[in-house]
Image (cartoon, rainbow, N blue to C red):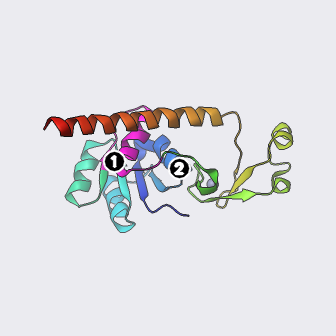
């Protein structure tokens, strides 16, 4: 099922854009757009703006565009900031993923479809593959998958910490 929330990430948040796509969220990476057009596109396409840029943040607020400041360089922290603000579940299911390269949805591929398009060892040892419906890139749960899981684990822990922190804060008031 397609995810409801949509995003636009500024030039400094390319890695966060790729992660949100993998988590299934339609995310534009605004690498070469001037600030005014980023805000305009966010408004027109109902996208939440993610930015490290103070000026862009203020511009978005003035225009009433939903914006989340993401002021850290750590990718797990970046993911956690967005997830805790919006209640996003940090589980990666490739059946619901979008292509980290081009933002198009992935679809499951038959093994026969990827023959010759992935390394032979991968073809022989893996049974699940996905293909990007936009750029044709083939994906599988390879050696990098453990790294993906570790970053998500860290992000989930950070979301939990933020939640506890907020609850404690509420009690002392
Ligand atoms: Zn693609």
**Quadrant, the N terminus:** bottom right
Q: Nearer the viewer, residue 61 or 149?
A: 149
Q: Which of 27/25 is in front?
A: 25
Q: Ligand 1, what quadrant?
A: bottom right
Residue farthest left in this picture: 173
Q: Alpha-carbon neighbours of circle 1 within 10 Å: few (<14), some, or many (≥20)? A: few
Using the image, determine if residue 118 lies above or below residue 40: above
Numbered label attached to residue 85? 1
Picture residue at 60% right of the left edge, 50% below the top: 93
- Where is residue 164 drawn, in percent x and y? 31, 35
**Does residue 142 sit above or below 56 in this rendering?**
above
Report if residue 74 lies within the magenta region. Answer: yes
**Within-10-Å neighbours for mark 2: few <14, some 14–19, many 20+:** many
Which residue bears the numbered disc 2?
Answer: 23
Q: Secondary structure at mark 2?
A: loop
Residue at left offset 47%, top offset 55%: 27
The magenta segment is 68-89
| Tag 2 and tag 1, C-beta contact below 8 Å | no
Residue depicted at x 42% and y 55%: 7
Q: Give coordinates of residue 12: x percent, y percent.
A: 41, 41
Q: Earlier in the sequence, mark 2 or mark 1?
A: 2
Rendering coords of residue 44 (x, y %): 36, 68
Verify whether residue 113 appears in magenta.
no
The percent position of residue 147, horizontal first and vertical second, equals 60, 32
Left or right placement of residue 88 versus residue 152 in this view: left
Q: Secondary structure at mark 1?
A: helix
Query: In the displayed image of the protein, which residue is found farthest to the front?
Result: 171
């Amino acid at each position: 099922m397609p995810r409801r929330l949509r995003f636009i990430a500024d030039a400094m948040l390319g890695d966060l854009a790729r992660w949100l796509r993998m988590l299934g969220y339609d995310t534009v990476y605004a690498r070469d757009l001037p600030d005014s057009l980023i805000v305009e596109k966010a408004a027109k396409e109902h996208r939440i703006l993610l930015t490290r840029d103070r000026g862009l943040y203020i511009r978005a607020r003035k225009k009433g565009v939903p914006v989340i400041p993401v002021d850290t360089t750590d990718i797990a922290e970046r993911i956690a900031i967005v997830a805790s603000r919006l209640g996003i579940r940090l589980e990666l299911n490739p059946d619901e993923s979008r292509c980290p390269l081009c933002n198009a949805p992935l679809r499951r591929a038959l093994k026969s479809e990827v023959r010759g398009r992935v390394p032979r060892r991968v073809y022989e040892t893996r049974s699940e593959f996905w293909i990007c419906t936009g750029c044709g890139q083939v994906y599988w749960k390879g050696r990098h998958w453990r790294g993906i899981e570790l970053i998500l684990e860290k992000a989930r822990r950070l979301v939990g910490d933020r939640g506890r922190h907020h609850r404690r804060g509420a009690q002392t008031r």
